[in-house]
């Protein structure tokens, strides 16, 4: 008689193993999954790459955590825990020997046997989370937490465990380099990237057309060969297989596909609108800001030089313009714009009307305009231009930075046509 094996779903999260010059959490997590696969009868249902709050103080590069949902026979749970504990203590002795850096890696693994509150995700993608409070909460919830004395990694690891993929999730296939190649220039020809973009339309952000450069290969000495982003698992896998057949692309060691919150706009609470109440002010480095009134209080909208079209539109605004924006509230309270739209413009005044080839002048208080040549009287008004004529700003059109200057989390305008996500205003708590 066959014994029925009951399987259980386990969620695993990992964060904060990065060092600026060595290693990469994606590769470490792949190593953990590989270790589990070698020792247990496991089905890896899903791998995750979860990007977190871009202003987090301790972030390295993209502030991303890794996660997975795996299925194992119920009786194997203790073995899984032991595998993870052993793997983690080896990781700790490895990172101990890393050269000193501004922030020492603070690795953390969170393992959960049941779904966890998604508040852990929402608070970690939208703002600062106190690591000690999170550590205690995760611990109390019954999850296993593996960490060293420093516990910073618990924020990302618990967020990766609690994130729930939805219709706005996308995929990233990450390919890692052969160890003999790490540290040498990556062989990923730009011609291959250009063709990838054409032949695999369901992949995205492969290149920055405004700069003619590829975006799939990182420029740091980390073990990642490239990452291919796309709308489905098949799309990124097909694109990867196609790239690996080419002579002008380096062979990879391993690869894995991840569900990700990249391009979800999850870091932004909501789109806002208001009236411009100041002239744009340019500060150092081409950064500029303007104040807008939302009906409650003035807010400072900041556009960085790197924001390109957003910065140009902001600098063309005038008091009275009605604008909509999406942006991140920075720790100083200003809003760092990621998308901007001139909804309704105030007229760009160019002067009084002409008569007899001359500008008409006011005939005095309470009177009209008079032509000094023929004496014609007209009511008072200003000649005006549209924002488009005066500075090229198109009313009703959203603008965003070029692909290489956007955050991992930012939803490109091209994908926004598929609908605007209804994002919870406040983090949702599961009862
Ligand atoms: Zn006249």
Image: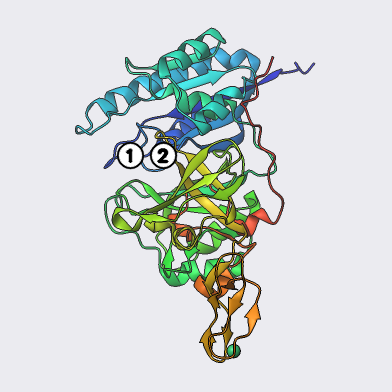
Please indicate whether residue 17 sits to the left or right of residue 345 in the image.
left
Q: Residue at x 38, y 54 (%)?
A: 281
- Look at the numbered discs 2 and 1 and tell me whether their residues touch, using CB distance below 8 Å: yes
- Residue, x 46% and y 20% (percent of image)? 83
Compare residues 425 and 376 and report the one nearer the observer. Answer: 376
Q: Can you say whether 420 is above or below 156 in the image?
A: below
Q: Residue 354 or 267: which is nearer the viewer?
A: 354
Q: Is residue 8 visible?
A: yes
Tally the numbered discs. 2
- 234 up-or-down from 81: above or below: below
State the residue position of label 1: 23
Quadrant location, ligand no. 1: bottom right
Rendered location of residue 253, percent (x, y): 42, 49
Q: Nearer the viewer, residue 350 or 220?
A: 350
Neighbours of disc 1 within 10 Å: few (<14), some (14-19), many (20+): some
Which residue was labeled with disc 2? 27
Say which residue appears at 35% left-offset and 31% top-offset. 58
Mark 2 lies within 8 Å of ligand 1 (Cβ measured) = no
Q: Quadrant of residue 295?
A: top right
* Residue farthest top in this picture: 140
Q: Is residue 116 above or below residue 212?
A: above
């Amino acid at each position: 008689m066959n014994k029925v094996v009951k399987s259980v779903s386990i969620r695993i999260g990992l964060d904060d193993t990065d060092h600026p010059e060595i290693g990469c959490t994606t590769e470490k997590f792949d190593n953990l999954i590989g270790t589990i696969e070698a020792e247990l009868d496991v089905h890896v249902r899903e791998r995750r790459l979860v990007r977190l709050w871009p202003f987090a103080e301790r972030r390295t590069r993209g502030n991303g955590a890794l996660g997975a949902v795996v299925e194992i026979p119920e009786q194997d749970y203790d073995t899984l825990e032991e595998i993870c504990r052993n793997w983690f203590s080896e990781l700790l002795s490895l990172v101990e020997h890393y050269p000193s850096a501004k922030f020492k890696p603070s690795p953390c693994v969170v393992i959960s046997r049941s779904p966890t509150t998604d508040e852990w995700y929402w608070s970690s993608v939208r703002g600062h989370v106190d690591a000690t409070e999170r550590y205690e909460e995760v611990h109390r919830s019954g999850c296993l937490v593996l960490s060293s004395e420093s516990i910073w990694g618990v924020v990302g690891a618990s967020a990766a465990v609690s994130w729930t993929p939805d219709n706005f999730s996308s995929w990233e296939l990450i390919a890692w380099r052969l160890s003999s190649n790490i540290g040498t220039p990556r062989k990923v020809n730009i011609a291959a990237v250009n063709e990838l973009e054409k032949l695999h339309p369901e992949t995205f952000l492969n290149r920055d057309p405004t700069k003619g450069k590829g975006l799939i290969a990182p420029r740091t000495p980390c073990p990642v060969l490239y990452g291919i982003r796309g709308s489905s698992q098949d799309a990124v896998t097909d694109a990867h297989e196609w790239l690996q057949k080419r002579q002008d692309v380096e062979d990879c060691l391993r690869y894995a596909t991840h569900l990700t919150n990249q391009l979800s706009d999850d870091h932004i609470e909501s789109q806002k609108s208001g009236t411009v109440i100041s002239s744009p002010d340019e500060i150092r480095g081409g950064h500029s800001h303007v104040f807008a009134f939302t009906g409650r209080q003035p807010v400072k909208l900041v556009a960085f030089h790197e924001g390109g079209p957003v910065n140009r539109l902001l600098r063309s605004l005038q008091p009275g313009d009605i604008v909509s924006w999406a942006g991140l509230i920075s720790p100083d309270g200003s809003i760092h714009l990621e998308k901007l739209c001139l909804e309704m413009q105030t007229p760009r005044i160019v002067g009084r009307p002409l008569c007899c080839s001359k500008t008409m002048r006011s005939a005095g208080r309470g009177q009209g305009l008079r032509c000094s040549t023929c004496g014609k009287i007209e009511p008072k008004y200003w000649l005006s231009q549209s924002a488009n004529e005066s500075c090229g700003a198109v009313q009703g059109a959203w603008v965003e930075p070029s692909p290489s200057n956007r955050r991992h989390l930012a939803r490109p305008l091209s994908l926004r046509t598929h609908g605007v996500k209804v994002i919870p205003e406040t983090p949702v708590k599961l009862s």
